[in-house]
Image: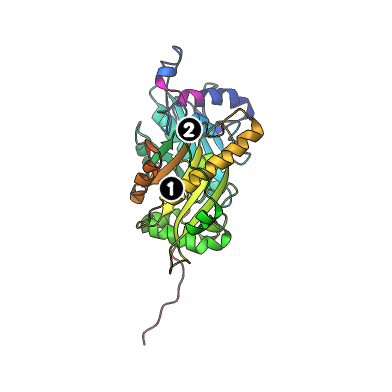
Amino acid sequence: MSVRGGRVRMARLTDLAALGELSRLSHAPADGRSSADRSVRVRSLGLPVSVSAVSAFSLFRMPLGAFQPHDPLYVFEEGRRLSGLARVEREGSRDEWTIVELDAVDHGDAGDIRLRLVQHLLRDGGKRGASRVHVACADEGGNVELFMQAGFARYGEERILFRPADAPLPEMPDGSAVRTAMMRPADPLDALALSRLYLVATPAPVARLEGYRLPDWERQGSHWRVPRSALTPILRFADVEAFVELCPPPATDELAAFIQVGVAKEDQPHYLRVICRPDHDPTALIEFGLAIVGERSASGSSRRDSHQHGHQHGILSVVRTYESPLDNRLEECGFGHLADVSLLMRETLVRVAEPALVPAVR
């Protein structure tokens, strides 16, 4: 299949200026475009762009800041002009890819261009050993239909919540209060308990698709991005910490809730991700996470610029639809609804049944 003679290829260094402009156009608000841009429509994944301080362009900072040597970047070229791009973040430890940007200038065939880019990266991912390809997108502009046409399965929806920078943050509790609330940093020995907590909070079909293993839960912190969400790519630019809240006696060997905190090091919002048991109120842990953001960002900003406030870009969080009423607890802590996105995934490997011994009947 060809689109007006164009082709998909890997990006080159000489493409960076054109790619930066295409990325900027795709995430610029419609009313903020210049008169020269108004005739050009660009279709993207539709991640949050409704608030000027929170845009996909500022979050993922394509192409220079977010790019790493092993990240594939594909372009659609037609007559020496770039009219489409697909950017992937590659997680080597799990052999998984995440599509974080998919843009095409709309001259009537943007859908075909985007489909060709997706099909090409899927073929290339299969050759490079990618086990899964993930994407999060808004259910608009034909995004979901395009990925399902390419063989992706839609397995969940997330609400993206935003806490503005002008909302005050809680004070850091003293050590005795933290111990009384049975909260502490996560460590590798919590892997089994974290896996059990995740399975309690997550429907079995979703857990099977995401396929987390115990080694995944052992690697909390240090830029690790499990559990996955629509916004985990921003953790590349954050200091990541994880904390857990223990169940009250007598079940103190089990976890009641988990929070992942990403304190931004760049010009972007901070990040919180909470997983908790359905019958548990995680308000205390959420407030503790907000206090961590306040303390870490204030100390970081004082090192960079004593006159700059470290909490100036707000905080993002995500809640999956099956995790309700967790979204209510976050809203009580100052978060507001920003956008809804769909989660899709395609497995590039074929699942086979594991051999097993069964009892024989004589």
On screen, 200 above or below 339? below
Give the residue type that dot 1 points to.
Arg
What residue is pinned by disc 2?
Answer: 165
Nearest the camera: 235 or 210? 235
Which residue is drawn at the image coordinates 41% and 59% (left, top)? 199
Q: Earlier in the sequence, mark 1 or mark 2?
A: 2
Residue at the bottom extreme, as displayed:
362
Quarter of the figure with residue 304: top right
Q: Is residue 102 visible?
A: yes
Q: Quadrant of the C terminus?
A: bottom left
* Residue 187 percent coordinates (x, y): 57, 58
Which residue is drawn at the image coordinates 58% and 35% (left, top)? 66
Give the side of residue 174 with respect to residue 52, left or right.
Answer: right
Tell me which secondary structure the magenta stretch mostly adopts: helix
Q: Which mark is residue 184?
A: none
- Marks 1, 2: nearer the viewer: 2
Q: Provide the secondary structure element on which disc 2 rests.
A: loop
Q: Which mark is residue 346?
A: 1
Residue at the top extreme, as displayed:
35
* Residue 208 percent coordinates (x, y): 41, 57
Q: Is residue 152 visible?
A: no
Quarter of the figure with residue 73: top right
Please check the rendered image and state whether residue 25 is part of the magenta-colored stretch, yes or no.
yes
**Which stretch did the figure color magenta?**
24-30
Q: Quadrant of the N terminus?
A: top left
Neighbours of disc 2 within 10 Å: few (<14), some (14-19), many (20+): some
Give the residue type that dot 2 points to.
Ala
Nearest the camera: 74 or 25? 25
State how far apart marks 1 and 2 are (Cα). Answer: 36 Å
